[in-house]
Amino acid sequence: MAAKAPLVLRLCLFLCISLSLLLLSSPQRVTSLSLDADEDDHYYHYDGDEDDDNYYHDDDDDVFSGRPARRIYDGDDDENYYRNDEDDFSSRPARRLYDGGAVMPEKYNVLNGNSSNSSSGSAFCRLLSLQILDLSNNKLTGKLPDCWWNLQSLQFMDLSHNRFSGEIPAVKTSYNCSLESVHLAGNGFTGVFPSALKGCKTLVTLDIGNNNFFGGIPPWIGKGLSSLKILSLRSNNFTGEIPSELSHLSQLQLLDMTNNSLTGSIPTSFGNLTSMKNPKIVSSAGSLDGSTYQDRIDIIWKGQEIIFQKTLQLMTGIDLSGNSLSECIPDELTNLQGLRFLNLSRNNLSCGIPENIGSLKNLESLDLSSNEISGAIPPSLAGISTLSTLNLSYNHLSGKIPTGNQLQTFTDPSIYSHNSGLCGPPLNISCTNASVASDERDCRTCEDQYFYYCVMAGVVFGFWLWFGMLLSIGTWRYAIFSFVDGMQCKVMQKVSSVDKFLSRGNTDHFPEFILKSGNVTYLDLSQNTLFGKIPDTLPEKLPNLRYLNLSINAFSGPIPASLGKLTKLQDLRMAANNLTGGVPEFLGSMPQLRILELGDNQLGGPIPPVLGQLQMLQRLDIKNSGLSSTLPSQLGNLKNLIFFELSLNQLSGGLPPEFAGMRAMRYFGIARNILTGDIPPELFTSWPELISFQVQSNSFTGKIPPELGKAKKLQYLYLFSNNFTGSIPAELGELVELSELDLSVNWLTGSIPKSIGRLSQLTRLALFFNELSGTIPPEIGNMTSLQMLNLNSNQLDGELPPTMTLLRNLNYIDLFGNKLSGIIPSDLGRGVRLIDVSLANNSFTGDISEAFSDHPSLTYLDLSYNRFTGNLPENLWSLPALKFLDLSNNGFSGEISSTTSSNIPLETLYLANNDLRGVFPSVIKQCRSLIALDLGSNMFFGHIPIWIGTSVPLLQVQHFSVVSRRTEPSNNRNQDEYGDRVNIFWKGREQIFQRTVDSVVGIDLSSNSLTEDIPEELTYLQGLLFLNLSRNTLSGSIPGRIGSLKLLEYLDLSSNELSGVIPPSISNLLSLSMLNLSNNRLWGEIPTGSQLQTLVDPSIYGNNLGLCGFPLSIACHASTLDEKNEDHEKFDMSLYYSIGRSYAKVAHIKALFRCKSASK
């Protein structure tokens, strides 16, 4: 029966698909195509419909005509078909509205889907009773009139897919907002989240996606817009964390924040979104005066961008993809049992997939790809019977892929790809436990049979139910047609050539079938592995393209000149390929371009000045492309340019003052070039919207312009690694929105201005590697948002200001390499999440018993090269996160106390050059992760413990004669990374290791008072490169297994009390290039052969009276060796006899003394 089941199933499915195609037999027109490898579903996007009378088609050349238009039910009343024959839109039919009576033009103004390019909108301000304003899909430009927000009867506003720009105007506080639906998507709006919406308590739908809004998402949305059901902020530049207050939106059904720059974690309070827990079918927004004017929204649904309208109230989902969210996926999300789609892909999420993911019983689409998720796939995932789209690729998942139920239908292995630890079907990686796999196969056979029976019964029942409704009930028949319309894309996926192309896992040239697709307007082939040249016939075959994305592939050759024929193209993205041949001149003849991305290629050549003719251009990104020329002054004509990125090239010359003409500029980046000269001060007086200015790693000179203080919206200022001179302008204190300021690695002089204390939003201040002098101003305590303070390598002096204790957000303090003095405040960082502290190379004094006692997050502490005194605080060994501790070159004294901690996380411990004393510290035995240890130049005594080779398995003990200090930080804004730089006595010479410090592995315990034998356990450390135990009082013999240290290059055991013969295994040290065994009591013949033959200096064996053989001039003879052996035995016997006789004399004297005392 199981063998016949697939045939029956195919027949049933064929009947369903055939019936669906009959219902959709109207001609279809392809208008959108996407082949993005990030999504599991690759699709055509159709805009046809069976009900042509109620479907508005836009066949002409207006902007974004590829989007399906809105379906409006009109009740077949042609008299209510409103036409506006006196305006500029008469060439197209207006929207049909049904309101049950006469149409009132003053209430409904529907002019969507036209080609108007007018910027005048003041005429609408007189329509005080206007309720619906739909100007979508036109070419309208300019800013929104302020008076529109005074239309207090306005309930529906759709301005989407035009060319509006500027900020949304603010409104007066008495504004009475009646808006229920606002659509501003697909324009060029800028600024922060519109405050004009703050009073719109009746707002149900808000779509401001695909604009240039920036800044944080305001928390007031959660309570101020309490009626929201749909919130779309996708494809903007929003930053910061997602406010937890959004969980107060109890009616929220759709949340779309994809493709922004959001950080932080997903709020756990999202699990309280009531409407996503228990979704209810409610009427959609926009039902005005009996009309059925319906709302709609664009959603990425199962990898496709689809417009939902009639079934909008049934959709429930969350899309947070394409951000920088981190930490774990909250378990609370599994409370949202009404979710139909969940997309968290392309973030930095970690931990595992929530175990209760299977409780999302209504989920149809789940995408967690391209994160840092680890662990096993929860078995409960197999319990989501509605799941039809799944993508878990590009993570760190491991274990066997769950089987059974709905997961059996997922046969594409790519949905699990790039998870090195996964095994089992549909992957070709078998799991090791064969018995378990056999049991699961048997189980799957039963489940398959049960699945086939259920499908057969469901098909039969569903067919007759469907057919009966079609014949009997008209309203049900209309509902079924609507449902079929929603299932249209899914059916076409099964029969389209796109599915056939992708099912082969094709890695090929530009797909030929796409060139035969006809009227495509949107083409996205990004993030595949396509190669070869871009076809010259592309404009001829697809002349209506408005969006073309070929980024992140392997296309090569020049950019075809034929692309200049794409007269409708607005968005051209070809970044991250292997394109060559320079930036083509013809691009300057495409004035409709808004976005041009050619970065991360091998273009080379100059920047064409003709690019300055692209008046509509908003984004120009040609970074890392080998460009070599000066910056053309003509680019200053790009008055609408918002984003400018030409970093990582070989551009030379100066920064043209004409760039001041880019008055819309917000993000300016020309880092890591070879630009010279001064920064034109007029830039900062002409760019009022500037947010980010990054010119680091060039050769700019002169002073930092004081005019920078005019850029009031500036958030990121990077001027580091240049040749700026002079003082830091006090005007920088006017940049009150500044978040990060980096002026490091320049030649700045003078003091730190007091005005810098006004930067209350600053999170990172980097002024290191300059020539700054004076004290740290006490006003720094006002910078309450500061997280990173980098002032190292300057000439700062004086004490730390007491106000530093007010910096409650401080994580990183780097002040090393200055002339600071005084004591460390006992409450420095108290109650703060300190992570990294470096105060090395200063003149601080006092003890540290209180300053660093309570910092559970502290991982790096460097106090070396100061004048600290006192005992080492016991609580240092109890810090749960401390991995690096350097207290060397101070005046610490006393013994190192033991600890009750069972596992100290320290990896590096430097205590050299202090006055510490006592036996070898037992606390080190608890440092099982210890890699580097320096106890040199103290007063430790006693023997080397035998546990050194077993209890601390990772130990690579290093002895530094100069402080291990960190050098210039990286330019990574997310974390400070430093490179260790250490001075090591390497092969008899003091050398500095920096880039290769991680590969230097060795032990140096020289110049102490260590006694007894060399532990045999030291020979277990087979990764050692050097071993120096010289200048101690070690006795016994050289360990016989010394030859097992195969990588050893340097061995110094000189100036001890070692005796016996040199072990023959020492000749096995093939890497040995430096050896010193002098000044001991060794005897016998020196081993020969292998690497020892190259060590010809006799001084390395000097002052060992019993040694003979090469390279010494003392020949070895058998009689001589026997004689020397006897001499050693006689010496030992005489030594014992002398000791015994001395002991007897002492005992005799003591006895006489006692007798005399008794006689008295």
Image (cartoon, grey):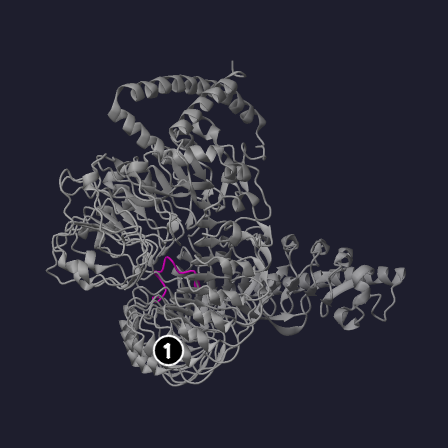
* Secondary structure state at the residue bearing disc 1: helix
**Residue 1121: in sight, yes or no?**
yes
- Seen as rendered, the residue at the extreme left is 174
Q: Which residue, given by chain and number where applicable, does mark 1 sit on?
A: 683
Residue 858 highlighted magenta (yes or no): yes
Rendered residue at 79%/66% (across/down): 1106
Q: Quadrant of residue 758?
A: bottom left
Q: Quadrant of residue 1004?
A: bottom right
Q: Is residue 173 left or right of residue 1046?
A: left
Measured along the vertical axis of the image, is residue 273 above or below residue 455?
below
Segment tinted magenta in the rendering: 850-860
Amino acid, disc 1: Leu
Measured along the vertical axis of the image, is residue 275 above or below residue 800?
above
Rendered residue at 12%/54% (across/down): 152
- Seen as rendered, the residue at the extreme top is 1
- In the image, 1133 versus 97, the foreground residue is 97
Numbered circles on residues, count: 1
- Spot occupied by residue 92 in the image (x, y as percentages of width and height): 30, 49
Q: Is residue 1007 left or right of residue 40?
A: right
- Spot occupied by residue 314 in the image (x, y as percentages of width and height): 28, 36
